[in-house]
Image: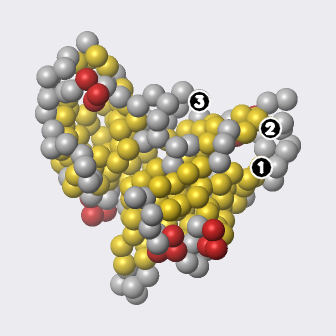
């Protein structure tokens, strides 16, 4: 099973700042089959990024993904008030599919 | 518009059975996998399994194999998640999600990533 470890735990940032979220895999994620999801309280997750760096339909370009192998990053270039949420990385390369534990981006 | 509408919240007792549903619309139901994801209270996301409605090919997480059953009814574009005997530890929010696919070397659609999600069904198991 591929274990995904996300960091930092709970960054406190201000609107307008840049957020850099990390996801490290315990083994290489084949073909970069890694996604990022955003979840707000009381809501279902929403797809942001798939295949490590492809933005999903309707996702603002302030969200970007990068990485390969075992190290992946989600960057939010300028935080908007609606971006404060929990973010999960997810690998769909190898069964069982796994998620990271989540990173909660808090308002400073 | 792609929509996945899940059945309502359930309150059950340990040992009872349960089936929750996920009705899909706005796309060809049989050509996309459907997945189920569990979120225990205050915790993260956990993949449970995927099913391809066209032939009911089902893939389960090893940790949940035998604990739940995933099925579909193609005639009504609905997927199901079923328990025979609930435990308190099954208390969680359950999400269904559409799964994109890619064709393997044999032309068979393999599950790819979750793109659209249902609103979730809260299952509470308590005596």
The answer to whether residue A37 of the structure is visible from this angle is yes
Q: Residue at x 81, y 53 (%)?
A: B84
Q: Chain under label 1?
A: B
| Quadrant in which the C terminus of chain B appears | top right
Q: How far apart are the two marked residues, 1 and 2, measured between alpha carbons?
A: 8 Å
Residue on which disc 2 sits: B12
Label 2 Cα neighbours within 10 Å, binned few <14 / some 14-19 / many ≥20: some
Identify the disc placed on residue B41. Answer: 3
**Mark 1: secondary structure:** strand
Towards the viewer: B10 or B25: B25
Q: Quadrant of residue A4?
A: top left
Towards the viewer: B9 or B14: B9
Tell me if residue A69 comes above or below residue B31 in the rendering: above
Residue B78 in percent (x, y) is at 61, 63
Label 3 Cα neighbours within 10 Å, binned few <14 / some 14-19 / many ≥20: few
Tell me if residue B113 comes above or below residue B41 in the rendering: below
Label 1 Cα neighbours within 10 Å, binned few <14 / some 14-19 / many ≥20: some
| Quadrant in which the N terminus of chain B appears | bottom left
Residue on which disc 1 sits: B18
Asked if marks 1 and 2 touch (Cβ < 8 Å), the reply is yes
Q: Earlier in the sequence, mark 1 or mark 2?
A: 2
Q: Residue at x 14, y 23 (%)?
A: A17
Residue A89 in percent (x, y) is at 35, 44
């Amino acid at each position: 099973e591929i274990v995904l470890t996300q960091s930092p735990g709970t960054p406190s940032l201000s609107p307008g700042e840049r957020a850099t979220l990390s996801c490290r895999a315990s083994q290489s994620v084949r073909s970069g089959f890694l996604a990022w999801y955003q979840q707000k309280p009381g809501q279902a997750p929403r797809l942001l990024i798939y295949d490590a760096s492809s933005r999903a339909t309707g996702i603002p370009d302030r969200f970007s993904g990068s990485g390969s192998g075992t190290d992946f990053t989600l960057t939010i270039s300028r935080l908007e008030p609606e971006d404060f949420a929990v973010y999960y990385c997810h690998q769909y390369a190898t069964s069982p599919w796994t998620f990271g534990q989540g990173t909660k981006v808090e308002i400073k | 518009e792609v929509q996945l509408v899940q059945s309502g919240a359930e309150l059950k007792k340990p040992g009872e059975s349960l089936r929750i549903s996920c009705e899909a619309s706005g796309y060809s139901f049989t050509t996309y996998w459907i997945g189920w994801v569990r979120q225990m209270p205050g915790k993260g996301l956990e993949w449970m399994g995927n099913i391809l409605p066209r032939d009911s090919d089902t893939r389960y997480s090893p940790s949940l194999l035998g604990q739940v059953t995933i099925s579909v009814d193609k005639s009504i574009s609905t997927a199901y998640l079923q328990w025979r005997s609930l435990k308190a530890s099954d208390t969680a929010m359950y999400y269904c999600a559409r799964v994109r696919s890619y064709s393997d070397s044999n032309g068979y659609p393999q599950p790819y990533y979750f793109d659209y999600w249902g609103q979730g069904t809260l299952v509470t198991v308590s005596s």
